[in-house]
Image: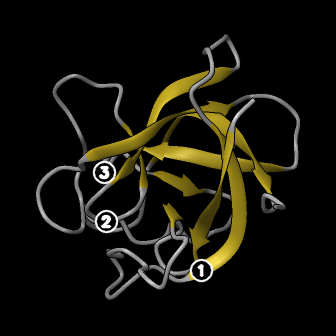
Amino acid sequence: MPFQGHWWRCGDCLAMFFSDSPSMGVCPAGGGHQRGQQFVLPHDVAENSNEQGGWRFCGKCQAMFFDGFPTSKGVCPSGGAHSAAGFNFVLPHDVSGEEPNWRFCDKCNVMFFDGTASKGVCPAGGGHNAQGFNFVLHAGQIMD
């Protein structure tokens, strides 16, 4: 199964974002995202009843967002809607695992960590609003 590393939980907005360089994208809390815990995510594999595809990298803000709605691409902190780029990530949900409590925000379409009292900062205003599946992600890094 192919995986991509360099995915991080932002310490400010709580969104999942990608960074393998000094660039930290655009955070709705202001400035660039802040690296917290690192993750490796599966991509370009078949969906099944406990793995949802359609998760993409936004080329404008660097956040992970759900690109599975034909007319809604969410709200990007860079302005307008998210812009899909790169791999099609297929993420496990509603299973036991290492890092649960990752959720879809129905206001901005990003993947955010819902395991604390704080709901982060949503580019659509206020905190994120959890909907849908409870995603379980793999913390760590890919070793060369």
Cα separation between marks 2 and 3: 12 Å
- Residue projecting furthest to the front: 144
- Figure check: 65 above or below 38: above
Q: Quadrant of the C terminus?
A: bottom right
- Which of the 4 quarters of the picture holds residue 61? bottom left
Q: Amino acid at mark 2?
A: Cys
38 horizontally vs 69: left or right: right
- Figure check: 2 above or below 110: above
User: Residue 90 bears which disc, if any?
Assistant: none
- Residue at (71%, 52%) from the top-left corner? 40
> In the depicted view, which residue is nearer to us: 45 or 52?
45
Q: Amino acid at mark 1?
A: Arg
Give the percent coordinates (x, y) of residue 99: 80, 52
102 horizontally vs 77: left or right: right
Along the polypeptide, which appears first: circle 1 or circle 3?
A: 1
Q: What residue is pinned by disc 3?
A: 108
- Which of the 4 quarters of the picture holds residue 94? top right
Along the polypeptide, which appears first: circle 2 or circle 3?
A: 2
Disc 1 element: strand
- Residue projecting furthest to the top: 49
Q: Residues within 10 Å of mark 1 (few under 14, many from 20)?
A: some
Along the polypeptide, which appears first: circle 1 or circle 2?
A: 1
User: Residue 35 bears which disc, if any?
Assistant: 1
Give the percent coordinates (x, y) of residue 63: 42, 59
Give the percent coordinates (x, y) of residue 30: 32, 86
Q: Quadrant of the N terminus?
A: top right
Disc 2 element: loop
Give the percent coordinates (x, y) of residue 137: 73, 46
- Residue projecting furthest to the left: 80
Q: What residue is pinned by disc 2?
A: 61
> In the depicted view, which residue is nearer to us: 100 or 129?
100
